[in-house]
Image (cartoon, rainbow, N blue to C red):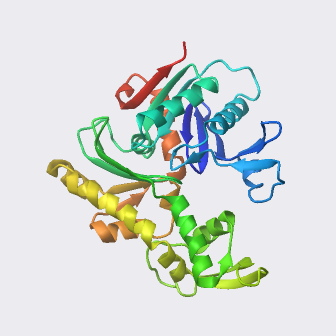
Amino acid sequence: MGIDLGTANTLIYVPGKGIVLEEPSVVAVDQNEKIPLAVGKEAKSMLGRTPGNVIVVRPLRDGVIADFDNAELMLKQFIRRVHEGRTLVSPRIIIGVPSGITSVERRAVMEAASQAGAREVYLIDEPMAAAIGAGLPITEPTGNMIIDIGGGTTEVAVLSLQGSVISESVRVAGDELTECIIQYMKKVHNIVIGERTAEDIKIQIGSAFPSDGDIENVMEVRGLHLLSGLPRNITIKAPEIRESMSEPLSIIIEAVKRTLEKTPPEIGSDIVDRGIMLAGGGALLKGIDKLITHETGIVTHIAADPLTCVVMGTGKVLENFKQLERVFSGHFRNS
């Protein structure tokens, strides 16, 4: 099976069946019993609404495992769900990981998967998996540029001949955009909102680049007023939300520019011809393709289904294992 173990969502692909699981990377644990009560959507719906003995954890932060035990619990539950409770035939698992993670972090991912029942674990860098999933010709001697904006990391990579020519990973992505909205609401409107509300604001009226009708794009938000401590309704506009997200967006743009500056000239001309491909959940932010085009002068395309690019890539590698063996960045076999 192929797994996109993301900060925000986990997706699993099984050859012959396609994507069989797409759930938030969240686990709810009973602290007294140390057992998982819920994983995925069910656990996410409990965020901010649990009694004292139950904690809801996102075991991945910035694209890497921050809480090993809970990550392993979550993976086990997801793998069991895919196998519909049947005893595991130890599977071969390919997992997409951020290109910038350390060897210790790579080891943690491999161990969590092997503890969850994998026979063999292969790691593939997310930009490579996303490029394969988006249908870029990575086996040919032409330069392809991909930007994968996930929940915890943004990956920028230039690929050619099944390898990475140059890549950069910054730990700024969807989560930081959400956090900026929370801080903005607190500073400017004296309103405290939760992560889920901020996420809704980002999806509904968030944008990276000005567009016609922006001013009319408004949303009513309910939160706790800082001074009175009572619930309060306010109306916010799209331009102010764009302003609140400007700092993390500029960090992403800088990473793209740095990567382009270091790209060899022959490959650079390929990228100008072919354009830049955007993948990951962050590609769904309105106007992000226009912002990148505006800042770099290179046409930017959004993948057909940006959320599933990485997991589709791991699936294609599983199905063409021999031809694509050179794309792996790590391998672990359970003895």
Q: Position of residue 41 (x, y in %)?
A: 72, 50
Q: Is residue 191 above or below residue 44?
A: below
Q: Nearer the viewer, residue 20 or 67?
A: 67
Name which residue lies at 62% across and 25% down.
Answer: 115
Name which residue lies at 47% across and 27% down.
Answer: 122
Residue 315 horizontal side relative to residue 32, left or right: left
Q: Quadrant of residue 197?
A: bottom right
Quadrant containing the N terminus is top right
Q: Nearer the viewer, residue 301 or 256?
A: 256
Q: Position of residue 297 (x, y in %)?
A: 27, 67
Q: In this view of the protein, can residue 15 be seen by the observer? A: no
The residue lying furthest to the left in this view is: 265
Q: Is residue 259 above or below residue 137?
A: below
Residue 26 horizontal side relative to residue 170, left or right: right
Q: Nearer the viewer, residue 303 or 280?
A: 280
Name which residue lies at 46% across and 32% down.
Answer: 123
Q: In this view of the protein, can residue 165 be seen by the observer? A: yes
Q: Position of residue 199 (x, y in %)?
A: 62, 65
Q: Quadrant of residue 269?
A: bottom left
Residue 18 horizontal side relative to residue 280, left or right: right
Q: Is residue 214 above or below residue 323?
A: below
Q: Quadrant of residue 237?
A: bottom right
Quadrant containing the C terminus is top right
Q: Position of residue 207 (x, y in %)?
A: 50, 73
Q: Is residue 307 above or below residue 162?
A: below
